[in-house]
Image (cartoon, grey):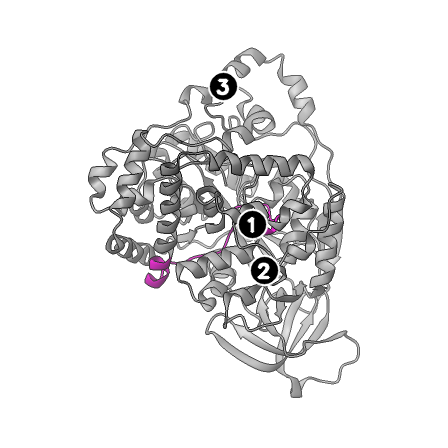
Amino acid sequence: MNSEPRPAGEDVTDGEADAPEERETDEASSSAGARRSTRRTLLKRVGLGAVLIGAGAAGYRPIASALARDVPPRTTWRGADGRVDNVTVVDPLDGSRIPGRSIVVRNGRIAEVLSASDVPGEKSMPVIDGAGRFAVPGYNQMHTHALQYSDRELAYATLLAQGVTGMRQMEGSDELLSDRAEQRLGLCESTPAVLQMPGNLLLPFNAGSVDDVREEIARQWDAGADFIKMIMTERDVFLAAIEAAHQRGIRIAGHLPPSIRMEEASEAGFDSVEHVGTGSNLFLSLAATPDELWRQQDTNMPIPGWLSGLPFTGELFDAFLKDRLINSVGVADPDDPAVVLLRTALASYSEQRAAELGDMLARNMTWQCPTLINLRSKYRLDDPAYRSDPWLDGLSDQERRQRLAMIETYEALPAQVREINHEYYERALRTIGIWSRAGVPIMTGTDGPGTDPARAIQLEFRELARAGLSPLDVLRAATTAPATYLGLDDRMGRVAAGMEADFLLLDADPLDSVDNLGAISMVFRAGHAFTAATMADKVDDRQRTRNANGRIGAALYPRRGMVGVGHVEGQRAVALIQCDACG
């Protein structure tokens, strides 16, 4: 897709570098009145039909009242001025390291990057001695649900502490789009920028037909959505959604429905595939006999279409049943036909077919945000390291019991099922490595709200390295690649004049080891400086407001003892090929 994406329009503007710039943000979470999705948003096989029929019009008033919310306030903030001396600037674009540089920041933007010997003797701005540290662009979390998290301030604080200065929110709504337009998302100098946000997820309830999806995309575009998020639709609706989004000049990203092959999505122009497509679709295509296996694939929709015409489905789903749907348990029977089909596909996995598909994805610029750490938390949840995750110490007793119960549920799955899950994940790693070498554009994301270190972006970096990406490749996936995808490479993704002053100081060379991407000494957000200790303390303070357990800020970084595993965000153990109508 060649159209320019809609500018995010949130806290960073394109004003003149020497003009004072006000940035309005909010403190709380939502707008007045009942939450409105589309006229019908989504449901699934969770027994909601009887609830809807029983509720009727009379039952809607108390539901709407329960969903009402206060209008969040606005705040204003400005980009900072300052100078950082004696740093080695690392450029992800060409992999260069230039030592002895000074970074001059004015009003939240980088005004100049100079040799330290050329810096004027200006006394009016604060100066920080970088002491030879490495300056890299801030990381971008390109698959997060931070705005859905109950403690948004904690999510923001944790993301920033991990070096995340920009994020692509992967689920939106009418009220979130409205809050963003009115600067009511709680964004300020100590939060990551919200780079993009969609409207409501596309499912049969708002995209039940070709006409429905065209109408819904037009409505979302008019409401200010930056892109369209696909979850699950019929085949003809999926293809029509791509066309409708591109006609509006916006991208479409998300999951591949059961009837869609990765190669078909790529040729049709689908812009960004999340979680390697979800389910077994990819591995059916990468098997030695893909057509034969695809003929056995169940492509029926798991959401009954008759629900799409009922009133208030969106409100009821969002309020009462969303978590149950998203976190549904997958197939656990090793003799289930779907499990047998996946096992057959994995057994005949072809690296040659993976390379051929990689060539197609690279040629078509079909972006991948694999969220490996999320996949790992589903398919490798029996790793003993999950039980010693340092984040567990920061949870309430109830949350800790729930997390451990998820692990126990997974560990109770038949050994054969868990072995297939393990192979699924290892094949996913291998495929991402093959695609990276083929030039497929890859971005970093974790599919979490950012609130636990086991979904820290540094762990995604480690998994990408396990897949075969070099430290420079990983750095690019977090910086220059998102900038290119968003059409914002003239203002983000590098430490250079004219860029937003969102950058990090690292204690070790990030091109020597991917672990060094977690060696964060300081984060600069719009020129405002935050030390690692300050950020960890803020995370601890927010965490203490939720429960009485101990500090978790010290576990934020790999170099401080963070366990190198994935984590589950409120989901029960998931086995194999569930439709995964999540992130």
Q: Position of residue 465 (x, y in %)?
A: 45, 61
Q: Residue at x 41, y 22 (%)?
A: 304
The residue that label 2 is drawn on is: 558
Of label 3 and label 1, which has the lower sequence position? 3
Amino acid, disc 1: Arg
Dividing the picture into quadrants, the one containing residue 30 is top right
Q: In the rendered structure, which segment of residues is drawn in magenta?
A: 433-454
Residue 230 lies within the magenta run:
no
Nearer to us in this view, 333 or 203: 333
Check disc 3 and report its element: helix, strand or loop. Answer: loop
The dot on residue 455 is 1
For the residues labelled 3 and 2, the Cα–Cα distance comes to 43 Å
The dot on residue 47 is 3
In the displayed structure, 48 sits above or below 485; it is: above
Q: Visible in this render: residue 64?
A: yes
Q: Count neighbours of disc 3 (C-alpha within 10 A) and say few if under 14, some if 14 to 19, many if 20 or more.
A: few
Question: From the viewer's perspective, is 428 left or right of 195?
Answer: left
Amino acid, disc 3: Gly
Nearer to us in this view, 163 or 405: 405
Amino acid, disc 2: Pro
Check disc 2 and report its element: helix, strand or loop. Answer: helix
Q: Position of residue 209 (x, y in %)?
A: 38, 28
The mark closer to the camera, 3 or 1, is: 1
Of label 2 and label 1, which has the lower sequence position? 1
Magenta portion: prevailing SS class: loop
